[in-house]
């Protein structure tokens, strides 16, 4: 579990300079500030996608090892499609979150460029869109632990 938090913090690294650059440059050159923020959001989504791809590769090439480590070997023997259902839940939720962050991020950057006071509210909406992936992860855990 601590590895998950470390991976999440590493994934947030591209966001830090993007937000700092945006906050400093939004008064001087709002267009460049918006481009920098969008670059940071896209980098975050790419790194999150690479983390998901890496987890999927590990899961696909060593499912018996992963199941034995969690003590769920008997669940695999009972229903071979449980891991497929969990992977589909996470995968589709992640794709949906990427689409949602893309549209809300673009709208948020446009709103912030016009009115810098809306930065906090726009960031909340982008964060809510990212929550869709977490819902898929929760469903996957519910499927695996049934």
Image: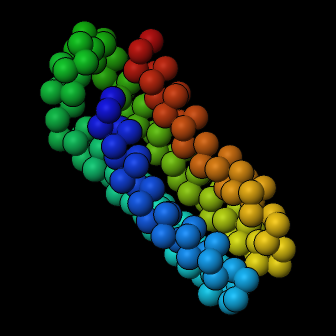
Percent of width and height locating residue 139 = 53, 27
Q: How is the image coloured?
A: rainbow
Residue 118 is drawn in which quadrant?
A: bottom right
| Residue 42 horizontal side relative to residue 27, left or right | left
Residue 48 makes an appearance in the image:
yes
User: Image point 45% across, 24% down: which residue?
Assistant: 141
Nearest the eye: 82 or 1:
1
- Residue in the image at 64% along x and 50% along y: 127
Q: Which is more toward the observer, 18 or 52?
A: 18
Closer to us: 61 or 77: 61
Position of the C terminus, as image quadrant, is top left
Query: Can residue 129 be seen at all in this image of the molecule?
Result: no
Q: Where is residue 116 in the image (x, y as percent from the top left)?
A: 79, 72
Q: Quadrant of the N terminus?
A: top left
Work out whether 70 lies above or below 90: above
Q: Which residue is drawn at 62% across and 65% down?
A: 102
62 vs 142, left or right, is: left
Considering depth in this image, is 64 or 111 the residue closer to the camera? 111
């Amino acid at each position: 579990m601590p590895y998950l938090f470390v991976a999440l913090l590493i994934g947030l690294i591209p966001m830090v300079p993007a937000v700092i650059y945006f906050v400093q440059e939004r008064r001087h050159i709002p267009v460049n500030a918006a481009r920098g923020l969008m670059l940071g959001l896209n980098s975050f989504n790419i790194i999150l996608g690479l983390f998901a791809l890496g987890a999927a590769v590990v899961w696909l090439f060593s499912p018996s090892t992963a199941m034995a480590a969690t003590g769920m070997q008997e669940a695999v023997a009972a229903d071979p499609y449980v891991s497929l259902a969990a992977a589909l839940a996470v995968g589709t939720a992640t794709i949906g979150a990427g689409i949602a962050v893309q549209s809300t991020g673009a709208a948020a950057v446009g709103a912030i460029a016009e009115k810098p006071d809306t930065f906090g509210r726009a960031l909340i909406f982008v964060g809510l869109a990212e929550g869709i992936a977490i819902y898929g992860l929760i469903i996957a855990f519910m499927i695996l632990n049934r």
